[in-house]
Image (tube, rainbow, N blue to C red):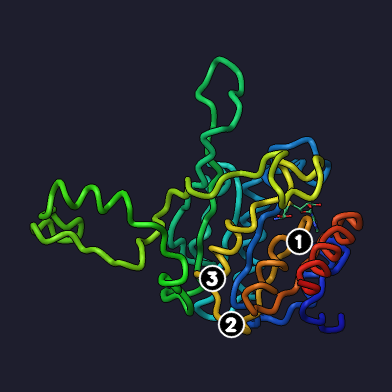
Amino acid sequence: MKQLEINKIYNGNYFNLIDAIPDDSINLIVCDGPYGATTHDWDKMPNGIQAFNLNLIDKFSTKLKQGGSLYLFGKPNCIDFIDYRPHLTLQRKIVWYQPSRLAQGKTNYTNNYDIICYFIKGKKPKAFNLDDIRISQMVELAHRKRCENVPSVVNGKWEKTKFNGRGKNPGDVWGDIKQLTYKSKELVSREALNTIQKPLALIERIILASSNENDLVLDPFCGVGTCPIACIKNNRDYIAFEVNNEYVIESNKRIDAILDE
Ligand SMILES: C[S@@+](CC[C@H](N)C(=O)[O-])C[C@H]1O[C@@H](n2cnc3c(N)ncnc32)[C@H](O)[C@@H]1O
């Protein structure tokens, strides 16, 4: 299979395209693919979402450069009971908190978060640009006034609260970036709401943290193109796949609009 061009969205199936990506060539993979939870045909998983994800993790581990990162989106159980450890190192499970999600039934607690599993290839990330993703420190400021000395979570010693004027680490519960609603300006269509389109700010945080300028990002399930747009805005190269041609057309329209800005 011939090598793929960069900065292009391929209309096709991930399973037919992924082998055209050379091994050890990708800095970052943003995988917002099937969750195994909706009624879309592509989301139906006869062997379960975990087996599907293990297959992805295995394949992605060969495509990533050493120190490259994978962010895998899913429901809270998306990597339960599978052994990903021979392939990649799980750095963190990030909770994308959705307080406004509607109640689902009356016999259990509503699920108010998605999981974003952050993996790296090897033991040390090639990029983790904390300064590019810091968030407001306001909560810490108020807390600091009340209590100057706090015990360190690392060694238990009481120390002065560390305070960085540029903002704080966003941590692993992301409640500051809201899911799109039908009123969101960036929403491309009602059809893309909830199960398809992600907020640009969410994908930008990942791109900024885990890649550097001119790095190559792979989005194997690109929907309406949020990740390619985040790449263009932040000077990263990308390769993206999407099986639904209407979404590819929509993505290219969004890309043309930002290139014209
Ligand atoms: C959750 S959406 C991605 C949304 C994207 N992050 C965005 O913000 O627009 C998942 C996408 O994967 C696509 N898809 C599902 N299975 C696929 C496959 N085997 N190959 C390529 N694309 C696929 C679907 O058509 C859908 O658009």
Which residue is at 91% across, 58% downward? 245
Which tag, 1 or 2, sits closer to the chain's start? 2
Which tag, 3 or 2, sits closer to the chain's start? 3
Which residue is at 46% across, 66% downward? 133
Quadrant of ligand 1: it is bottom right
Could you say where residue 187 lies in the image, as x and y percent from the top left? 74, 48
Which tag, 1 or 3, sits closer to the chain's start? 3
Relative side of 6 to 116, left or right: right
Relative side of 161 to 34, left or right: left
Query: Circle 1 sits on which residue?
Result: 225
Q: Looking at the rendered structure, which numbered label has been put on residue 146?
A: none
The three-letter amino acid code for the residue at tag 2 is Glu
Q: How many marks?
A: 3
Alpha carbon separation for disc pair 3 and 2: 9 Å
Relative side of 138 to 76, left or right: left
The image quadrant where one finds the N terminus is bottom right
- Near mark 3 (Cα within 10 A), the count class, few <14, some 14-19 or many ≥20, is many
Query: Circle 2 sits on which residue?
Result: 213
Alpha carbon separation for disc pair 1 and 2: 19 Å
Could you say where residue 160 lies in the image, as x and y percent from the top left? 12, 61
Query: Circle 3 sits on which residue?
Result: 208
Would you place residue 256 above or below residue 33 in this image? below
- Near mark 1 (Cα within 10 A), the count class, few <14, some 14-19 or many ≥20, is many
Which element carries disc 1, helix, strand or loop?
loop
Q: Quadrant of residue 167?
A: bottom left
Disc 1 within 8 angstroms of ligand 1 (CB): yes
Would you place residue 246 above or below residue 194 in this image? below
The three-letter amino acid code for the residue at tag 3 is Leu
